[in-house]
Amino acid sequence: MMNTTTKILAAAALSALAVVGAQAETYDGVHPLVSGNSRADVHAQAVVASHHVNPYGDLYGEGVATIAGNIDRASVHSQAVAAAHSPNPYADGYGEGVMSIAGTVDRNSVRAAARAAARGDQLPL
């Protein structure tokens, strides 16, 4: 009898805990936006803010750097064009030259095999 009573009390205690723990929080929905500004006012403020200096930028407060030089514009332009047309020393494969593939395969046979592959024909082994 004692064993049964203990089991019943334990089950009742667990049921009470389950009922208390099953309470869910309430959902109030989306909170309404409270603002006294009209859409036009908010837009005008956004335009003003977007044209101001970004205080969180990397160079904030540095000012505009001026470089005084005695090289004329045409000389700088010609140097830039020469640099743009020169090989890039930081590129992959710089200084390796052009790899030449010398073979004894006839150009027409390679072309014929490529056309056959494009059409889905069986290639000769």
Image: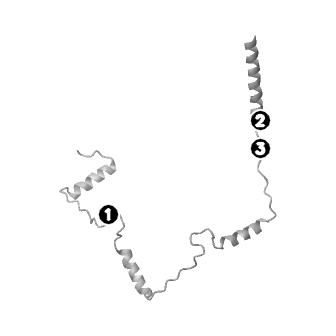
For residue 87, above or below residue 101: below
- Residue neighbourhood size for the residue with mark 2, other residues' Cα within 10 Å, grouped as few (<14), some (14–19), many (≥20): few
Provide residue 42's location: percent of width, then percent of height. 75, 67
Choose top left, top right, bottom left or bottom right for residue 93: bottom left
* Outermost residue toward the left in this view: 104
Quarter of image, res 44: bottom right
Name the quadrant of the N terminus. top right
Characterize the local packing of mark 3: few (<14), some (14-19) or many (20 or more) Cα atoms within 10 angstroms.
few
- Label pair 2/3, CB-CB below 8 angstroms: no
| Distance from Cα at disc 1 to Cα at disc 2 | 67 Å
For label 3, the SS is: loop
Q: Is residue 110 above or below residue 85?
A: above
Q: How many marks?
A: 3
Q: Which residue is mark 2?
A: 23
Residue 2 to residue 119: above or below:
above
Which callout, 3 or 1, points at the residue further toward the start of the chain? 3
Residue pictured at 60% horizontal, 73% vertical:
60
Circle 1: element type: loop
Mark 1 crowdedness (10 Å alpha carbons): few <14, some 14-19, many ≥20: few
Q: Amino acid at mark 3?
A: Tyr
Q: Which mark is residue 27?
A: 3
Q: Which label is found at residue 32? A: none
